[in-house]
Image (cartoon, helix red, strand yellow):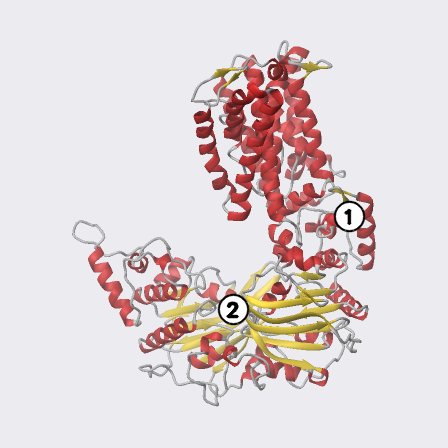
Amino acid sequence: MTTRAALPVRARPLARLRDPAWYQEYGVYVAVAAVLLFNALFTEHFLTAGNLRTQLVQVAPVVIVALGMALVIGTEGVDLSVGSTMALATALLPLYLGYGLLPALAVALLAGAVVGAVNGTLVSVVGLQPIVATLALFVGGRGLALVMADGRLKQIVNPGLLSLGTGSFLGIPLVVLIAAVLSVAVTLLVRRTTFGRQIVAVGGNRSAAVLAGLPVRRVLIGVYVICGVLAALAGVLATARLTASDPSSLGTLMELSAITAVVVGGTPLDGGSVRVLGTVAGALLMQLLRATLVKHDLPDSTAQIAQAAIIIAAVYVARERRSR
Amino acid sequence: MAPSEAVPHAPAQGRTARPEGVTAPPTGDAVLEARSVSKRFPGVVALDDVSFALRAGETHALVGENGAGKSTLIKTLTGVHRPDGGELRLAGRPVSFARPAEAQRAGISTIHQEVNLVPLMSVARNVFLGREPRNRLGLIDFARMHRETTELLDGFGLRVDPRKPLHTLGIGTRQMVALARAVSVDAQVVIMDEPTSSLEPREVETLFRVIGSLRGQGVAVLYVSHRMDELYRICDRVTVLRDGRHIHTGDLAGLARTRLVSMMLGRDLSEARRTGPTGLGGAEHHTARTPVLTATGLDRRHQLHDVSLSLYGGEVLGLGGLLGSGRSETAKALAGVLGLDSGDITVGGRKLRRTGPAGAIRAGISLLPEDRKAEGIVPGLSVRENIVLAAMPRLSRFGVVSRRKQDRVVDIFMRRLRIKAASPEQKVGELSGGNQQKVLLARWLCLEPKVLLLDEPTRGIDVGAKAEVQGLIDELAREGLAVLLISSDIEELIEGADRIVVLRGGSVAGELAGDTVTESHLLDVLADHSPVPAGTDPAAQEDPR
């Protein structure tokens, strides 16, 4: 295997099919294309503007959360508290909508930043393992949200907030537009800024980053804050689409969807690389797969099994590549 | 170094009387024997035809520098590795261990520096782990376990409540518990790998007493340490390994320390100074009058004791010492990576505040770390990004990296250091060791430092790259940079350095300058035959003669 992988790819076109690096790099895009192709051939009314629009609107919150998750995973971390952060955001919105839409949004996003700052501090200053540090707010965040909302579901009537969920610009739903703009922004952040490159360096070799005088703590805290704010934003958008604030169920299992999108997108779990577009494609793949199976009248549980298979494939490819 | 503070002064032979009650002389039978043992790893021969025998009741020192094969030998003896050639004999019979557990069952116990016990369990449970005494109902007989543990530890002169969780005890006591466990499983051979490196002097005394009682019971002890004083105090015989080969086995009494050190390092005392096969210039550099960097009284528990040194612009200061003497720790302390308990560092007349590596870098100190893979390269990033890693803030505006500025810097240094890569975008993990090292040098040089600390800059790189790096060190010193060079390669150190500060046991053992920068002088100081240098705290000295 090793010798084959060492051969120039162009000399043997089939060689790339044996190279795990190639799958990790492009596999997710190929899979998205394959699902689309399958649907174009075998599913009625799939490749219609209406259906694609629905799919994109549904996947947008996952994409937004996964963008933050990709940054955290790039530092060899993980953030389990994103779903609870969404719940916190949704619980805070009705409490502050009386002061106007903007103050309520600001409070919700600020809550996300605070959660992120706590996570980041626990990881970088206290030195807890990310999975343990973020577990605290995974459990506590939702509890806090329920306390603030008196455990009740509240209808949202603020027209400004509702238009975030239903409005569109040039025919593109606002939710999708926001997710797209954020994807571009995070791509630029990772590729072009000092901060972005430091994220990758901290994840790639923490000791080397420390010795090179990188502000490791600041980078870690920053990454978790970004992740928290993005999760809170996803919470706001999901609330707008639901037209209700429901802290008991909003964002449940979101952490797993986000991690799945990142991993399927080819970002290694052991840090040192952030693949933003891959993450977006990963989220999209999971969404399309599920929609496809549902359209073919297969139960939702089949979709879960198919998703599990893809996750295992993604992790296997990453492991094969590392062992080279 | 600290452990011998409470110890009676050594007689002229460098060997004290053993602790009381320990008189049994080593007997002649070999308990554990390695015959022509070889072990190869991809690319290296870790053990090459090594033979040696451990006798019942003796304490046998195993010494050697980095890469000598000590750990491989131990791992082969304890079933972690299987030898590729040769055989092991236990009490005269050939044995072969597939797993460490088999070696343990056969009576070979290993005490590691990090004790392999369960911290949350009680002392007694740890001693009896896996072979707990049972009562009639098949339950653990705690009363008996606690009683036997107390008796066992009493035998070592150790008063510990057997019910206490292990993690509440000091490291030294934990090691004793590990030893107690080893002895109570009827070990015939106990292997100790640097047992004293994190012990207090008092704990060292207890350990030596326990080793003494093991000797009385006819247990063979293989004692790995780089602390000469300890070896001469408690060991009967010594085996020297170097580059995976057996160099010497013999009685320790009567073996001159200088001779032992030169066998470890593989240098003959007669070799001339500055002979010139390395790429280092040899000629002295023009040294500035005022020091660029002054360090005074650097202190860190268990690692550094009152280390002081000055670095002048335009000179290469060598930092000599055996394994574990505190060379890397000194460099790391200067670079702000290792925290200090006390001590001052001044750069260019300004005192360095303890702001970590970032502060040291701002002050103009750059450290090329010893472990290239673990502390140097970021393997998944490109050559370009690895070079600019530390300089990134200087090459960006408003947090956005300027690709143009980066490319210019990268181009300059790839050319100057002749870094061979397909392109600046190639991942650094794919380069050869020598080119990786050049990338790291470029990372530090592009910060335009005043002081460059190089920890083993030529270790593990090919001959060509080695000469290039050595040539570069020489060139940098000529340009006025202050360079601190740490090297286990004696030749490189002697030829490269204008001055050499020698460390031993975490404190300054001596300084060589001018005509005394020779191998024989260096070996003398390494082996502790030099007068106590002025200005050092006598209490911190290894051997208060």
For mark 2, give the secondary structure: helix
Residue B146 seen: yes
Quarter of the picture holding the N terminus of chain A = top right
Q: Residue furthest top?
A: A45
B231 up-or-down from A61: above or below: below
Q: Residue at x 32, y 58 (%)?
A: B126
Which of marks 1 and 2 precedes in the sequence? Answer: 2
| Residues flagged by tags 2 and 1 on a common chain | yes
Q: Nearer the viewer, residue B204 or A150?
A: A150
- Chain to which the residue tagged by mark 2 belongs: B
Image quadrant of residue B373?
bottom right
> Would residue B327 be found to the left or right of residue B392 on screen?
left
For mark 1, give the secondary structure: helix
Using a 10 Å C-alpha cutoff, classify the residue at mark 1 as few (fewer than 14 neighbours), some (14 to 19) or many (20 or more).
Answer: some
> Would residue A25 be found to the left or right of residue A311 on screen?
right
Question: What numbered label is drawn on residue B395?
Answer: 1
Name the residue carrying label 2.
B70
| Residue type of the residue flagged with mark 1 | Leu
Q: Residue at x 56, y 64 (%)?
A: B340
Q: Residue furthest bottom?
A: B12
| Residue type of the residue flagged with mark 2 | Lys
B190 up-or-down from B231: above or below: above
Q: Position of residue A274 (x, y in %)?
A: 65, 38
Q: CA distance from mark 2 to mark 1?
A: 46 Å
Q: Nearer the viewer, residue B222 or B247?
A: B222
Residue A256 seen: no
Q: Position of residue B479 (x, y in %)?
A: 81, 68
Q: Nearer the viewer, residue A174 or B233?
A: A174
Q: Position of residue A184 (x, y in %)?
A: 71, 30
Q: Position of residue B538 (x, y in %)?
A: 52, 81
Q: Residue furthest front?
A: A99
Question: What numbered label is drawn on residue B136?
Answer: none
